[in-house]
Amino acid sequence: MSTLFYKTFFLVLFINILLPQTAKAQNDSEIILYKKEFELEKSHITEKTYLKILLSDDDSNDYFDIHYQEGNAPKILKATIFNQKGEQIKKFKRKDFLDLNEQDGGVFVSDQKIKQLQLPQYGYPYIFEIEYTLEYQNFISLTQWSPIYYYQTPVRKAFLQVTTPKNLKLTIKSDSVFNYNQIIDKNTISRQWSYENYEPIESEYLAPPLYELIPRVTIIPDKFFYYSEGTAESWASLGNYFYQLNKGLTELTPSEKNTINLLTAGMTDRRLIIEKIYNYMQDNTRYINVRFGVGGLKPYPASYVCTNKYGDCKALTIYMKALLEHKNIESYYVPVYAGGNPIKVDPELPSSQFNHVILAVPNDQDTIWLENTAGYLPSNYLGTFTQGRKGFLIDSTKSRLVNIPPLSEDQTLNESYYEVNISDQETLEISFTKTLRSDDFELLSFLKKEKRNHSIENYIRSNTPLDNKSDIVFKVQEFDRNTPHLELKGSYQTNSFLQKIGDKWAITAHFLKLPNFDVPTKRKLPVRISSPIHQINTFTFHLKKGLLPQPLRDVKIQSEFGSFEISYKAEKEHIKATNKLLLNRQDISVDAYPSFWNFINEVKEAQAKSGIILSKSHE
């Protein structure tokens, strides 16, 4: 849901980045050799990277980036250009590397830096070879390593070596495709993984995240040091580390306490108090990502937000927690992996697998969930950004993974009602009402808050049966701000789905948005539908006197993947046509994909044949 949220950050710093951000499509370029070596000695890690890359033409990368934290600059061991014969063309010096601030649209202040090298844009093909080291003392994870370096570049050979003390307990998870070896010395053990001939995976519509599809090695030490000691022996022990990190951060300023007291004076209903405070937080703060030092993990205190009126997701969540705490309302800090197509949390691997934070507020037998970075969303609303996944509820030594509720079929239902009159000019005069939920609701709520009426009109034009020349009048219906749906009303004229054939009229009555999937022979990846796709469109056609419909046939298609219906109801001077589509929340394997595609194709064919033919009455 990138239209709704600024880019969030990963909670773990110094983790080996899975896919570098400098990646771009490279047709004939390839990674000849990619080596990564980690050595852990006491609480000190040395990370060495070696790359040998064939750059084929000017479609290749024009620069090479090394990401690091301020005060921890990489040591460049060598950076050289060779021709394909192995002859040295250019040797780079330290001064050739530029020191830049990492630019991230969602980050207000950061100590993340880039060392950037401009690569030659001539003399292709050539080989670029670089080797450098990084050293650091604060870490939670040793590595989450993949043999991929750039998204669309093949890798001929990749190698990982991790050297640790023999007595250090590690949690290791690796895919079976790697070749594995280990070397045991007197005091250390070196574990080695290698992989050859990786070919890029092409992205496909509604596929799971690439992270879940590529081979990788994850290594988590049971004991770590990130500005303070912690253990990852279990989710409870890791959660206790976060709990201790957050301790003492919920003290409000005296003026803020007084404001909350006045705001909730006379209120006794707990749910309404939570809602009132949440809306106050939304109206008086803004989201800005602050990433500096331990700030990658530790929130800024509530008093910081009281004073500055802004913060990142961690700071705003701690601030909201503090506001509730002032009213003796208990709540829990919950890291989560956010996004419309999230990476699934591995429950067998206690580690920081999250990039966002929300708040859980127990309420009787229920839980109220609060997203604290979006001022336009209702209280107790977790949309497509955070619904239906694992969260890490921080509760001291009782910390645990919890299931965040998924959006239901009803919560994702988008309904459109059209009143259609055929005018004497043989055009259609249409008025409509759209009730939007889920991602459409989130998008329109954001556009409404930002007063982007032109974008709202573009949305209507993309999701309504009209032609580009049609003038449209619309308004966004006002509701209580904590209502989890939005209503659009409007009207327009069109002839885009009306056609006269001799003395008959043909009306198209199918305007459900259907996913566009490849045929089974082309599909290589599984399908993931993270929340139900649920649409109902109802058209009431008011007929001109003397026009009668030819026989109408209802359609009903049922499948394990979802359902589709077309139903008609004909009365004296109008016809009501209703289309319903439901695609279930589901993962569909490559083996099951042909059956899924057959269902989608059957729906498309049924919809294409669902027009209404009107003919003149002979009475």
Image (spheres, rainbow, N blue to C red):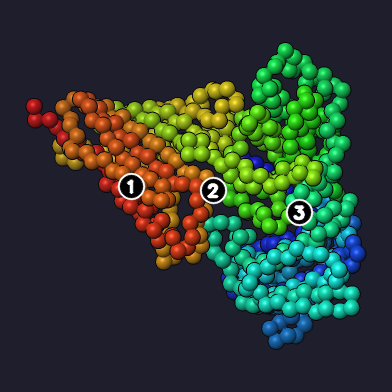
Question: 490 or 42, which lies in front?
Answer: 42
Determine which residue is flagged by label 1.
Answer: 557
Give SS at disc 1: strand
Mark number for residue 92? Answer: none
Residue under circle 2? 530
Viewer-side residue, 508 vs 175: 175
Left or right of 256, for residue 586: left
Q: Residue at x 14, y 32 (%)?
A: 616
Residue 561 pos. (x, y %): 42, 50
| Amino acid type, mark 1 | Ile
Farthest residue in the top direction?
266
Q: Is residue 291 visible?
A: no
**How would you rate the neighbour count of disc 1 (Cα within 10 Å): few for under 14, some for 14-19, many for 20 or more?**
some
The quarter holding residue 26 reads: bottom right
Give the left or right position of residue 266, taking residue 209 as reference. right
Of 111 and 474, the residue lying toward us: 111
* CA distance for labels 3 and 2: 28 Å
How far across and down, in percent of the image, does residue 48 sit?
A: 82, 70
Q: Nearer the viewer, mark 1 or mark 3?
A: 3
The quarter in which the N terminus is drawn is top right
Marks 1/2: CA distance? 22 Å
| Residue wearing tag 3 | 234
